Amino acid sequence: MKKVHLFSLDFGSTTSCAMLVEAYLEKNQVTGKMYFENPCIVYKSEPVFTPVENDKVNEIKIGQYLQQWLSESRVEKEQLFSGGAIFTGLTAKKANVEQIASQVDKFIGPTIANTIDDPNLESWLAYLGNFSYSTFGDQAVLNLDIGGGTTNPAIGIGKSVLSTGCYAIGARHFQFEPGSYLLTALSESAQETLQQLNLNYQIGDTVLTGDIEKICDFYVAQLKRIKLGQSACQHLIEVPLEVKTPVDKVLLSGGVGEVYYDFLRSGELPPTTYFGDLGVDLVKAILRSNLLQHQEILPKESGRATVYGMALFNTDISGSTVFLDHHTELPLNKIPIIGSIRMDTEQSPTFLEQLKQLLMTQIKVGGALFLDWNTASVTELRGFGKLLRELINEIVSDTSFNIQKPLIFFVPDDVALTFGNYLTQWREWTFPIFIIDEVPHKDASFVNIGRKQHHVVPVSFHGIHQMRGLYA
């Protein structure tokens, strides 16, 4: 077994944190697929307030946090197998978030995949990061990841995520002078919520305690509607959650979830507007409601579910026979996913035209294409390789395309090396080609591929359209 390090960062609306997980690369003796064995959290930072000033994230302070977290975790960036940084909620909408993401890239290294404002991915990661799968058996679990800017719900059974969503329900839409209800900031969504409740407050006003309760009860009522599969208020909906099965259990994660579970453990809540927002009052509203009913489990990583999920579940591991030509250098980041196609042994005219159009698009941008089949004999693999080679040659010859970026193909089964040799005529064909096997197809816009280590490569997806039906 080979030990690897997985590093993740979560830059949320209210707080930011880092986590380092150690695991072992292992092959499942039944399926033959690679997986992370015995994951163990070896470092988790204390949460810090995300340094936001004048609608921008403070780059100097972020750099200081990155330096501190790497130092405390006692890991060098060259030792990292994979990881990710996710920017969520209100932070993802700040004017310089792209520059901050680039700063993380330079500081941590290209092994880290940056994800900005990817609500379905955030919901999926928080669900997987929040609880032990064996706890609820075949019960349908709704995880509500409540942070500063959004609530990211996900419904799942065991490891299978059935549906994800995102709503503008969070603690920092209303911001206060800590220790009081003196308003210091209002988001656009908060202003619409005030209109919905017929309340009239401006920055500089002190909100009455009764109106604070009214606002928080309104948010919790929307969460109950989401749980029941009913529509929330329109101004709160970013990605609607599909609820096709009755929810058996509800769990919380995110900053609000952490305050809630800390209260269940200790019986104490932080002081009024301790975080300068509605976090504590939202917990009080949840306690007043029957949203969670009888809570039977206290999740271990409730406040850090997303960063834990990012470390452990955002990375897929390739098979051990990837095909990489000599001209392609890793890592490869933000590669567009062109689409997917099921290989047709009969090669109908419709199939050939569809495949040709996908390849033409792929050649233009150097993207990734999923090739799928149930099973393939050696003869069929040889035929598929020849077909792709002939179509690519035809496209290049007809249109004078100059292939400079690698063509990436994801294939099922442990056949990447065999298929690559057939496609390139045992490397006599010199186009840049990269073939990766045994990575599940995800409905996403982009893929990041890390450096090859221990004969495998880490793969992560972002720009998630919907995480429905995926397994960890």
Image: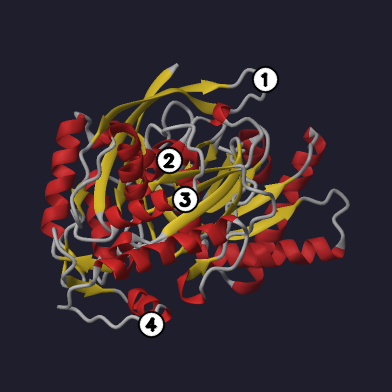
Instruction: Looking at the image, tell me whether mark 1 or mark 2 is earlier in sequence order.
Output: 1
Look at label 4 and name its amino acid.
Answer: Asn
User: In x, y percent, where is residue 325?
Assistant: 51, 43
**Residue at x-position 28% and y-position 63%:** 172
Left or right: 332 as drawn, with respect to 226: left
Gap in Å between the C-alphas at discs 4 and 1? Answer: 61 Å
Instruction: Looking at the image, tell me whether mark 4 or mark 2 is earlier in sequence order.
Output: 4
Determine if residue 447 is in view.
no
Look at label 1 and name its amino acid.
Answer: Val
Location of mark 3 (residue): 144
Q: Decide: marks 2, 3 in contact (CB < 8 A)?
A: no
Q: Decide: marks 4, 1 in contact (CB < 8 A)?
A: no
Instruction: Looking at the image, tell me whether mark 1 or mark 3 is earlier in sequence order.
Output: 1
Gap in Å between the C-alphas at discs 4 and 3? Answer: 27 Å
Single out the mark in the foreground, 1 or 3.
Answer: 3
User: In x, y percent, where is residue 147?
Assistant: 35, 55
Single out the mark in the foreground, 2 or 3.
Answer: 3
Q: Decide: marks 4, 3 in contact (CB < 8 A)?
A: no
205 shown above or below 108: below
Gap in Å between the C-alphas at discs 1 and 2? Answer: 25 Å
Location of mark 4 (residue): 198
Q: Secondary structure at mark 4?
A: loop
Q: Secondary structure at mark 3?
A: strand
Q: Residue furthest front?
A: 210
User: In x, y percent, where is residue 60?
Assistant: 11, 57
Tell me, for residue 30, which label it has, or none. 1
